[in-house]
Image (cartoon, grey):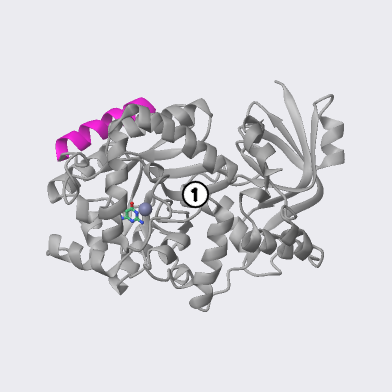
Amino acid sequence: MTQSLLRGRLLTFHRAPEGPGDDTAYTYLEDGGLLIGDGLIRAMGPFAELRARAGDAPVTDHRPHLMMAGFIDTHIHFPQVQVIASWGAQLLDWLNTYTFPEEMRFASETHGAVMARAFFDQILAHGTTTAVAFCSVHRASAEAYFAEATRRNMRMLGGKVLMDRNAPEGLRDTPQGGYDDSTALIAAWHGRGRNGYVISPRFAITSSPEQMEMTGALARENPSCHIQTHLSENRDEIAYTAQLYPRARDYLDVYEGYGLLGPRTLLGHAIHLEEREIAALAESGAHPVFCPTSNLFLGSGLFDEGGLRARGIVSGIATDVGGGTSYSMLRTLDEGYKVLQLRGQALHPLRAFDWITRGNACVLGLEDRIGTLDPGSEADIVVLDARATPAMALRMERARTLAEELFVLQVMGDDRAIAEVYVAGVPTLSERPRERAAAG
Ligand code: GUN
Ligand code: ZN
């Protein structure tokens, strides 16, 4: 086995830090080493110890930068790379005016393939090594997504959206067609390489009861697949859902009634929840996903992370591009901090960085594989530079602690703070020499 050794400041989390002084929740090494072999982290520890163990393995020295597990984005839309920054609308108008017309373009296999390359370039440039994506309704869009993920050997999850009504011609499947395409995609991609298939009913508004029924069958027949959808993002969406499903007790009950609720279920947004829905979320172990840049951009509302956590509910955090406005999990944390401030909840940077790494891995049930630098984990690693811009460097002159440095990254950082990204032990930013050179 060929091995390599990375050297740098190193941070990995063991559990969610409970407050500023909770220093047994993580390991921080000022001069740390990671021994990489066959795409996995073989050992983590003080560099000097690993150097002695590693024979003549080549060393890449990232000091003074900070090495951490690659970021995980638990909710993003692959066909919306050209929807970001669409002006003036809230959810339902935004979908009809901008998003649905754009997603129609993914009927073309060529367009899907070109956009897949662009999408993966973007997420990697922003330090994200795993994402959970909605593809378009077209089977070809999911084929393009998984083909690109496989080519890059990335751990990626996703699925074609199921949507058979309240969308334009060309963007609707049928209950049987959606079931057949999803089944074929699962057979082709789920568990192949590092890919995982996600059964993806878009939301209650765009799926008929017949489609929801077939989606329940997909979930029963494929229990190792995740399920993703949207929940209670916007007041008009909730009112329309109640009209379309008059017998449901509330929005969540639509999904619950078709057997779609469990620990592998990811529910984007989940902002305006009723008490019964919160109790059902806690009972089922399903995961709400906080999408702060999107929730602010679309004027959707303020997610209550602390309130849900107090009920034992474990939330993910995500970009939701293209309702979201950045691929960066650092920008996402920045906006998330502000949203939670408005709720009287101050997100501590140690908790924040745990959330976008180990925390999101736990939400996906993948914490044994990704999200930490523990030996045995897949070697998906991000290298962070907290002095990436002059303004950050100036602020860092006054930073004394690790938490302060993390907060500078969280509040001021973006793709410029990503010095390197490893996917299964292989550096990837060197694949983009032109962009790097242009950035100076
Ligand atoms: N609800 C249903 N589809 C979407 C989507 O594409 N983006 C967002 N933000 N919410 C949705
Ligand atoms: Zn979404």
Residue placed farthest to the bottom in the image? 344
Residue located 53% across and 29% down the image: 152
Q: Position of residue 413 (x, y in %)?
A: 64, 56
Give the residue at mark 1: 73
For the record, the magenta segment spans 175-190
Asked if the magenta segment contains residue 354, the reply would be no
Q: Where 254 sits versus 340, above or below? A: above
Neighbor class of circle 1 (other Cα within 10 Å; few <14, some 14-19, many 20+) is many
In front here: 183 or 262?
183
Q: Position of residue 376 (x, y in %)?
A: 63, 36
Residue drawn where x is 53% and y is 75% of the image: 341
Vertical order, 384 against 269 (above or below): above
Q: Is mark 1 within 8 Å of ligand 2?
A: no
Q: Where's the N terminus, which quadrant?
A: top right
Compared with 56, 324 (above or below) is: below
- Residue 300 image-quadrant placement: bottom left
Residue 245 in view: no
Secondary structure of the residue carrying tag 1 is strand
